[in-house]
């Protein structure tokens, strides 16, 4: 993954696929829009699915609720977290 911007685009597609958001297109999800409880309708159960997808696809763990709140603030926050934690390997 070359940069956060590319990762944002990839994550939007994966979020839609993982959660089966039928009426949502990647461009419908704002880079900085609130992810959980925002326009996408993502809730805490969806977050668990996303956490598992991120761990499986990117090898990045989100181990606490406090971290999850920060990381799932927006797609940009999620992408930055994955990007910064993948590079440490």
Image (cartoon, helix red, strand yellow):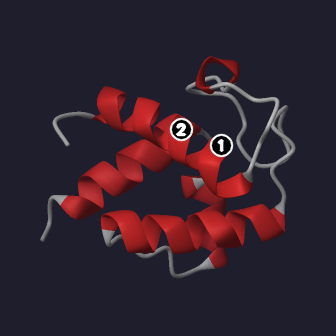
User: Dividing the picture into quarters, in which one does residue 87 lie?
Assistant: bottom left
Q: Quadrant of the C terminus?
A: bottom left
Q: Relative to residue 69, is residue 62 depicted above or below?
A: below
Question: Which label is found at residue 13?
Answer: 2
Q: Is residue 7 left or right of residue 17?
A: left
Q: Give how far across and how far down residue 10 sits, in percent.
A: 42, 37
Q: Nearer the viewer, residue 68 or 3?
A: 3
Marks 2 and 1 sit apart, C-alpha to C-alpha, by 5 Å
User: Dividing the picture into quarters, in which one does residue 57 lie?
Assistant: bottom left
Q: Relative to residue 38, is residue 46 depicted above or below?
A: below
| Kind of element beneath mark 1 | helix
Q: Relative to residue 12, is residue 78 depicted above or below?
A: below
Q: Are marks 2 and 1 in contact (CB under 8 Å)?
A: yes
Q: Quadrant of the N terminus?
A: top left
Q: Is residue 73 visible?
A: no
Q: Give how far across and how far down residue 67 sits, in percent.
A: 55, 68
Q: Relative to residue 37, is residue 39 depicted above or below?
A: above
Instruction: Residue at 32% x, 72% y: name it.
Output: 59
Q: Which residue is mark 1?
A: 16
Instruction: Residue at 51% x, 81% y: name it.
Output: 63
Q: Classify 10 Å Cα crowding around label 2: few (below 14), some (14-19), many (20 and above).
A: some
Q: Is residue 77 left or right of residue 70?
A: left
Q: Give how far across and how far down residue 15 sits, in percent.
A: 60, 47
| Kind of element beneath mark 2 | helix
Q: Classify 10 Å Cα crowding around label 1: few (below 14), some (14-19), many (20 and above).
A: some
User: Dividing the picture into quarters, in which one does residue 55 lie?
Assistant: bottom left
Q: Give how far across and how far down residue 36 sits, in percent.
A: 77, 49
Q: Is residue 9 visible?
A: yes
Question: Which label is found at residue 38?
Answer: none
Q: Residue lying at the far bottom in this picture: please name it.
A: 63
């Amino acid at each position: 993954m070359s940069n956060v911007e590319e990762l944002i685009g990839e994550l939007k597609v994966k979020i839609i696929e993982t959660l089966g958001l039928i009426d949502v297109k990647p461009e419908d999800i704002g880079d900085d829009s609130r992810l959980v409880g925002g326009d996408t309708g993502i809730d805490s159960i969806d977050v668990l699915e996303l956490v598992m997808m991120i761990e499986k696809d990117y090898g990045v763990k989100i181990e606490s609720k406090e971290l999850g709140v920060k990381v799932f603030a927006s797609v940009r926050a999620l992408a930055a977290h994955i990007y910064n934690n993948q590079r440490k390997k």
